[in-house]
Image: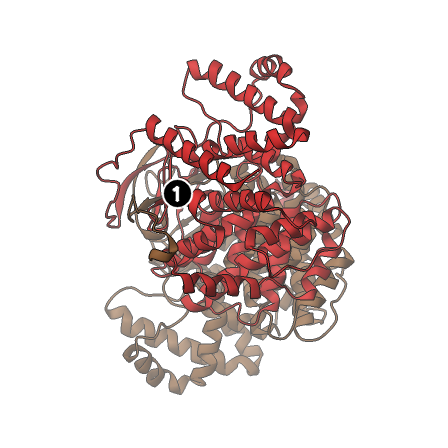
Chain colours: A brown, B red
Amino acid sequence: MNLQEIDDLIRQAANKATKETNDEPEPGLTQDVVWPVDVKIGKGLEGAIATTTRIGYVNGAKGWLVYRGYNCFDLAEKSNFEETTYLLLFGKLPTTSELRNFKQKLVRYRSVPRKVFEVLKMVITPKTHPMSALETAVSVLGNLDEQANDTSAAGETEIAVKLIAQLATLAGAAARLHQGKSPLAPDPELSHAGNFLYMVTGKQPDEFSERIMDIALILHADHGMNASTFTTMVVNSSLSDMYSSVVAGIASLKGPLHGGANERVLYDLEEIGSAANVKTWFEKARETKRKVMGFGHRVYKAYDPRARIFGPIARLMAEKNPAIGGLYETAAELEKVVCGELGAEKKIFPNVDFYSGIIYKALGIETAMFTPIFAVSRIAGWTARALEYLADNRLFRPRAVYIGPIKAEYVPIEKR
Amino acid sequence: MNLQEIDDLIRQAANKATKETNDEPEPGLTQDVVWPVDVKIGKGLEGAIATTTRIGYVNGAKGWLVYRGYNCFDLAEKSNFEETTYLLLFGKLPTTSELRNFKQKLVRYRSVPRKVFEVLKMVITPKTHPMSALETAVSVLGNLDEQANDTSAAGETEIAVKLIAQLATLAGAAARLHQGKSPLAPDPELSHAGNFLYMVTGKQPDEFSERIMDIALILHADHGMNASTFTTMVVNSSLSDMYSSVVAGIASLKGPLHGGANERVLYDLEEIGSAANVKTWFEKARETKRKVMGFGHRVYKAYDPRARIFGPIARLMAEKNPAIGGLYETAAELEKVVCGELGAEKKIFPNVDFYSGIIYKALGIETAMFTPIFAVSRIAGWTARALEYLADNRLFRPRAVYIGPIKAEYVPIEKR
């Protein structure tokens, strides 16, 4: 096992992506938006332009994911979560001393007030959704921080950094409490990814596991104007406060239409049981019009670049960890069958959720924690975009078209 | 003091509204929206059509506020919060037995688990924003309810009714704890408004106070696609859960650009000190370009119908309660000066927040509780609209236009 293998896999995935899609920038990708703009919008505000951004770019047709101009393959291969977060928040790659200071700050902010653990202990049972517990915990943090209502750019940025550090601690605590164990103290010697993995699993991670968790955190850190990022921005636009905005982001990500998909992929794979059962299972799913989780995406009409990386990593982990070998084989067979059969009708590809669950399971993480991992990473994008919007803020307030009656006569209750 | 006086004031306000605005329905108010639709949108999604609705209608040009076809003057005069909530949630005015059952259910749901009070006690200090405490409390409720993740229409509706009842209890508890006192148990003999007032102030309300609180709750229950209602819908659209959706609504309403305005009106009035100081204060405010709170509205370009009702009620209360007499006189003078001076340039009117703070103060409620009162009422609109959207759900996901670089080269850290 060596780390070079992982770098090689990412490079191969990047080369494959370049070969399969036209890798030239489209003209007009960078647009000036002068409000108001004419747009065609669909239900769920599809196509509505909510804002302009310099933070991240997704090109669904080409399968591109870009943070601040850097493509996700380069970042997955060469960067780490701390640096990527710095890039998202502050708009440039840090120098050596900037990164050192930023890492030190994240480490200092890892610990949370004792009261938060007390509340977590009161609310978490094996039946609690860890995302609800995280929502509560961040809300409690906001109550306890006397600086919470400093909605200046500097104030909100500081809280963003604090929350990026603390959400990992809270998720680690939630994972332990969910299993009936006591939370662990953060280890200041470990990287953000390494410490998070340690707090969740209770084991000092080897460098291989730490690196894979780091890649997962990098690749989930931002993804265009997804529902939880948008929610965070909407709440922040009333000048609420960064804690409340992140609470709302967690509340949104919790939903199975958004953050909950990779959990469900794993339940499907476990239900299928083995590669040999895939064909029968899939035919039945098509007959009963059951949605097969982990395929297709509202934005990507090409292969999801994150899945290009996660697929080979899952394969590598399965080779070294026979316990998940069967899961991987089932998944690989399902991809072949789904993309083969449905692919004949329309292009369909696995998305980020298809292989990530297998990877987390191989890292020793229970399924209920998959969405919290997503949150621990995506908070970088949530806060970066909320801060960017705050700099030229306008309260989000779309409209609804009223289609009911206008003048109803109030009839006294005894005459109804 | 008699209740008829209040009814008369509301009727007079309604007549004045009819006289001053063209009260005929506009043609084309009821539109069919066929997605996708062409629109012109501004920053903050201004003008973007997020959905169609049969729940409520605001006509800003005419100064109309309508719930399910019933205008707000009729509802303020003839209805009560329980009935209005039933109307918003279920689309029709209830029969006698439907209303009785609904009221009984709200009363049954008033009590909350002991653990929630324990958490509130841990987080509330005199410095805590009561909205942050409410956010935490509702999130804790969600953790403790094993039915929380039932996102069927029936499941979410039941939780909505439960939360409408419980939010008043939580706000009452927050008010008491904020003052260093113990929360009170709900009184099942009182109406929703009466019990809420009792829990906040610690005094059995007289019928006059109860009626005024009821009117305030009716008039704040729904208001088009405002930011907190939209937030609640956005979170619910990921099929998160009704608790998390309401938590996000609270998080949004907390912001001073949304729910916090009436607090700030009162601080202004207290700063002005007396009617005699208004002119000087206002001239200084204009010179320093300080925003004068309580005037103008993103939607209303006519007199806010809620302010038409709250203004005279504040005057009536000031007559009977000399302690707020000075505040009312200051406010009335400020309205005269602002609307007189600015009114010469453009139409400007007081909004709902301008007089509501004086009324709450006259009811014996501390300023920090003004936004929680708003939440205790608006939760009716939040949940009604989230449930309506859920019936034909589509995840909210607008887009951002990327205006940054597309292909940046990753430079190793030692070369930056």
Depth check: give the residue in front, B246 or A257.
B246
**Residue B57 horizontal/vertical position (percent):** 36, 43
**Residue A187 horizontal/vertical position (percent):** 76, 61
Residue A393 vertical placement versus A171 (above, below): above
Identify the residue at horizontal 44%, vertical 59% (top origin): B238
Q: Please state, as top left, top right, bottom left or bottom right, where the C terminus of chain B lies in the image.
A: top right
User: Residue flagged by tag 1: what amino acid is it?
Assistant: Asp
Residue furthest to the bottom? A276
Q: Please state, as top left, top right, bottom left or bottom right, where the N terminus of chain B lies in the image.
A: top right
Total numbered badges shown on the rendered structure: 1
**Residue B90 horizontal/vertical position (percent):** 38, 59
Depth check: give the residue in front, B387 or B401.
B387
Circle 1 sits on which residue? B74
Q: In screen coordinates, is A345 left or right of B383?
A: left
Query: Can residue A84 be seen in the rendering of this structure?
Result: no
The quarter of the picture where residue B192 lies is bottom right
Residue A104 vertical placement versus B189 (above, below): above
| Mark 1 residue element | helix
